[in-house]
Amino acid sequence: MCTYILMKGNSHMKNKHKSLLIMFSALALASCGTKPAPSKTIEESSQQPVSVATGHFEMVTNLQNVMTIHTDRQATYLEYNGDYSKIPADQYPNGDQFLSDPNNVTLEWTHDPDADQVIKNYSVTFGMEEDLSDGYEVMGTTEPTIELMNVWLGSNYFQIKAYYEDGTDAVSDILEFYVDETCPRNIKVEGLTNCRDLGGRELEDGGTIKQGLLYRTSGNNFQNKAGVQNVVGKGIITEDAKKEMTDHLKVKTEINVNSNTQYNLNLPNTTIKNCYMDYGGNALHHFSRNAESVKDYFDVIGNSDNFPAFFHCRIGTDRTGLCGILTNGLLGMKLNDIYQDYLFSNFGNIEDKRYVGEIAGQDNVEIYINQIQELKGDALHNKFYNMLLALGIPSETLDNVINTLTDGPTATGNDAGQVVANVDQLSISGTTLKTDSSDRDHPDNYVTLSSDSTKVSMKVNADKAFTGQIVAYLGNSENSSTKKISDSIQVDIDGVKVDVTNKTYADAGMGTCGNNRMNYYPVILGEGEFSAGEHTLTISGKSGNMNLGTLSVFQD
């Protein structure tokens, strides 16, 4: 008979703690080989379980089994082995139920205290670190079992503690259980919906996104349908859930990407960063009308002092989805995983079903993802990086995000000779530099190009010949489906004209949001040839007014 004995990690316990020996029942361990190699603190022994004077704990839960946090319906969706952008709509819920919460993990044991000891209650402390330096204690009852909520993907270390009525206690050595690493690590925040950790995902260059640093959630009081009332536990966060977020998930920063503050959680001892975003129009407008707010969002997560953090809008799907897609893409998540994660929001109570493709209508995120893929870059994450550079986000900020949130190898190939300049770094002729004092109406600095006499130019020093992709961060209030970018903008390199895109204003994301705030978006103007040496790239107006905030040149 094969018995496992947990070897003692400490030679003694201090104060009132009593030394315990944890043993595994041979029957409970009949199933072997179903998880990665167990912790090195577990070793095979021919000895029989032996009680010690201070008490006997025996695990009933088979710790050799791989546990899962996903419900059967979630698991079925996550097991789909095709292209998630084309997954049949009947393979995931309709977005009108509370189905996004994970399963808890249940641990059970037996315990025989000394005859003179009376159990007051048990607790289990668990975490990702072997020494439980990150441990979170969950209080139980007098029953030798406990449910753990929001466990980690992969290895979880835990320690059982028995509290006695006489004020003494006893603790076990540290044990391990293992959770299937299939993402997402969806989390339960009672009262909210559509909550999950961005962490755990494998990345294109070999790393993974760190767990426990960046979460996405719905907002508070998020239900907004006729006849539906927000109540505590269904639409309104509970007090226990607030404690779960601050004490267990240890969140420090709340990032609000809704248009106002009415859905903020306002958790105690957290800092709120309002990166206001509007909703409406279409998925491209989710981006273009909120481009300045995207910059604010990355400014927050580009500061490692703000983690752990969570971000939300109202239902945590569209504006939150935009931020999630841009973050995941920047870090190097595979495109299929980006779509899988986006559609997982349908397990939340988000009111209307989300799709990908034409069937999605105004919420088709494929529109802006496809436009990102048109940018130069060897890998998908390089294209996301360039898109964010083209907004005017500093490379230092993007690199900080990548380095903070990546475990293992970080995204490569991002330093690819890009030439990026905000308008205040350009030479300006025939127009004046404008400075915006609002939070998000315009870039901090921009110019208006209205005729061929209004222009900006920058120097491009090429160490070798290359074909450059010229991208301008443009803004215009017209959402015209007939006017073209080439009607308003002309480009030349050293006086030689460059063909400018015939993309319409509408397809370029131009227009206004509900409060007449102008849309801005990085637009690929065209491609030009740069030989080795110094060149002058000039962007001029033609007719109409076109605002410009940043100018970029990308190469493969």
Image: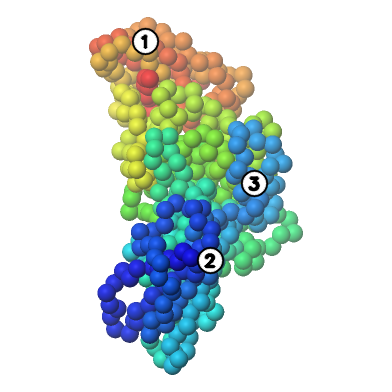
Q: Residue 149 in the image: x percent, y percent?
A: 52, 64
Please tell me which residue lies in front, 457 or 406: 406
Which amino acid lies under the numbered mark 2 shown in the image of this protein?
Ala
The answer to whether residue 485 is left or right of residue 465 is right
Crowd tier of the residue under label 1, counting other residues whose Cα lies within 10 Å: few below 14, some 14–19, many 20 or above: few
For residue 76, the mark is 3
Measured in 3D between alpha carbons, the distance from the residue under mark 1 to the one under mark 2, in whole angstroms, is 69 Å
- Location of residue 111 with respect to 116 vertically, above or below: above
**For the point 34% across and 39% down, which residue is it?**
409
3 vs 1, front mark: 3
* Label located before the other in sequence (2 or 3): 2
Query: Nearer the N terminus, badge 3 or badge 1?
Result: 3
Tag 3–tag 1 contact (CB < 8 Å): no
Q: Tell me the element at label 2.
A: loop
Instruction: Give the tally of numbered discs.
Output: 3
Q: Which mark is residue 381?
A: none
Callout 3, which amino acid? Thr
At a point 35% along the width and 59% down the height, the residue shown is 40
- Nearer to us of marks 1 and 2 is 2
> In the figure, residue 129 lies in which quadrant?
bottom left
Pinpoint residue 198: horizontal percent, then vertical percent: 47, 48
* Position above or below: 108 against 290: below
* Dot 1: element: strand
Query: Can you name the residue that lies furthest to the bottom here?
Result: 116
Which disc, if any, is residue 28?
2
Secondary structure category for the residue under label 3: helix
Residue 220 percent across, percent down from the top left: 57, 59
The amino acid sitting under disc 1 is Glu
